[in-house]
Amino acid sequence: MSEQLDILIVSEEETITNQVLNSINREENSVTVIESKDVSREINRQTRDFVIFIQANTDYAVEQVQYVKSIHALTYVIFLATDSDISLLRNIMRAGAEEFFILPDELSLFISRFPTMQQNYKLRVHSDQESAVVFGRGRGQIYAFYSGKGGTGRTTIASTFAQTIKLESAAEVLLIDLNLQFGGVETIMSLETNRSLVDLKPVIHELNENHIRNVSQTESHSKLEILISPTDAEAQEIIDGDFISRLLRACRRSFDFCIVDLPSAIDENTVTAMEEADKLYYVLHADTPSLKVLKHFEELSERLGMDLKSSMEIILNQTSKEMELKEKDLKELVRYPITASIRKDYKKVQTFMNKGEPIRKAQKEKLIPFSKDIRKFAKSVLS
């Protein structure tokens, strides 16, 4: 690949196009501007390094992003949105776009970050390491863990999953505790700090990676970044859906994987996090009370207009031979795919809980059955 990058801009918005063109070094890059109707022809004619979509009044934005990635998976796709339609932006990221920015508020952020994106792209293309490609495409994935019933092991699973992803890959991983009233992750990870995600409130409108890392805590064993909950009931009044949305979007841009531990209570913050997530993992016990709560959650999500069909998957926790309901039985009772099954390992997990120690500490270590199942789940996500 030559040092000069081939950049394609897809736009019908002349004013925004000119602003973007002014931010690109035309001597170091070859830039072409087309309308959305010409995307297929141009992509088939020539391989592009960057494709920048400036949102137009069209229903084909997601399909066009998918088409670009299907022709050349390494093409770096950026989507500049003219409105903050959460559903559209989520679908754009699922289609394969590496970055999105909301105009006009984030135009300056795009302009400041574009040179770094170009440099990272060059390194990724020149690299012979397979992982560079994998994490380039998977960058910014948000995985939320939820259960409508307390005591299912949701926080333990979410924190161990985040720790495992970090230990088993070269990815940048952030764990976010949204249990605002009582927290919990700081105990599992043995962290002591006065800082929490609520400290980001004053800078939420210009939030960037530096702000996040100044507040997050680094777990000493894996170097996992963690945003601690304020463990303060009054935080419910300080933090709202807009804060959660801006926080998760900023985290998406700075980390390969953002793991979110959600509280059982359904409120504006929880719903916003679920809508921002690429995957929602519902932690379920194989018993009647848990199935009833799941049914109530499904009914509530439908009333709230939440579409979970494509994003929600089930994690079975504390499975054992003594269970009356087996996994094959549950597949007939729930309409969501069962993506992981975690064995009952109460005594060994409880030992770590009582000591206040993380369950995973190193890539090569003796794993308890719980950790083995989480590792299998994490590797399926990484692959």
Image: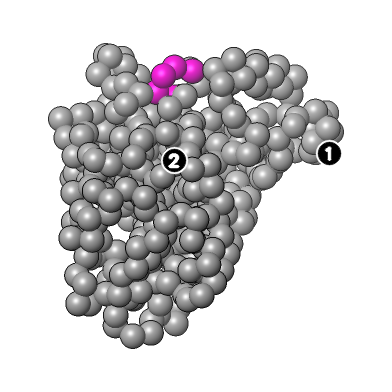
For the residue pair 260 and 154, the one nearer the viewer reads as 260
Magenta stretch: includes residue 38: no
Magenta stretch: includes residue 267: yes
Quick check: 78 above or below 266?
A: below
How far across and down, in percent of the image, does residue 72 sit?
52, 70
State the extent of the magenta-drawn residues as a range.
266-270
- Tell which residue pokes out farthest to the left in this image: 202
* 210 relative position to 292: left or right: left
Quick check: 17 above or below 284?
A: below
For the residue pair 26 and 282, the one nearer the viewer reads as 26
> What residue is disc 1 on?
328
Quick check: 143 above or below 155?
A: below
Dividing the picture into quarters, in which one does residue 124 lie?
A: bottom left
How far across and down, in percent of the image, does residue 139 sit?
42, 56
Would you say residue 264 is visible in this rendering?
yes
Q: Residue at x 68, y 29 (%)?
A: 285
Q: Residue at x 29, y 83 (%)?
A: 3
Q: Secondary structure at mark 1?
A: helix
Q: Residue at x 56, y 60 (%)?
A: 67
> What residue is disc 2 on?
57
